[in-house]
Amino acid sequence: EGPGYVNVDAAIARSFPIRDDIKLNLRAESFNLANHPNFYNPNPSSYFGTGSFGKLSQAYDQREEQFSVKLLF
């Protein structure tokens, strides 16, 4: 059994009408919003008594954010 996994993703979007036939869409997204470290399971091929036994040596991606602007006409 490995370490727990906590992940919170969020997005917010807004549409602004410019004219009757033109709209501007803004969007912001965040992945792993809390920036919680999520580690892979320990290496199952390491043996008891070795230096790498039970060691958490890798983690999933850190927080990522992306923004977009879309003009619809």
Image (tube, rainbow, N blue to C red):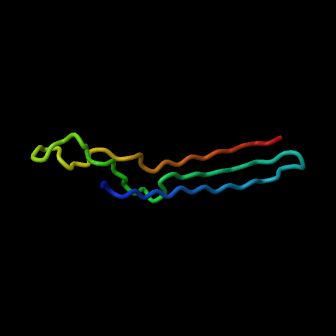
Side (left or right) of 37 relative to 19: left
Looking at the image, residue 47 lies above or below residue 29: above
Number of marks in the rendered image:
0
Side (left or right) of 27 relative to 35: right
| Residue at 83%, 50% in the rendered image | 18
Q: Quadrant of the C terminus?
A: top right
> Is 71 in front, or is 52?
52
- In terms of image quadrants, where is residue 51? top left
- In terms of image quadrants, where is residue 68? top right
| Residue at 17%, 44% in the rendered image | 52
> Is 32 in front, or is 26?
32
Of all residues, the one furthest to the right in this rendering is 20
Image coords of residue 8 (percent x, y):
50, 58
Side (left or right) of 64 relative to 11: left
Image coords of residue 66 (percent x, y):
56, 46
Image coords of residue 37 (percent x, y):
36, 54
Q: Quadrant of the N terminus?
A: bottom left
| Residue at 31%, 48% in the rendered image | 41
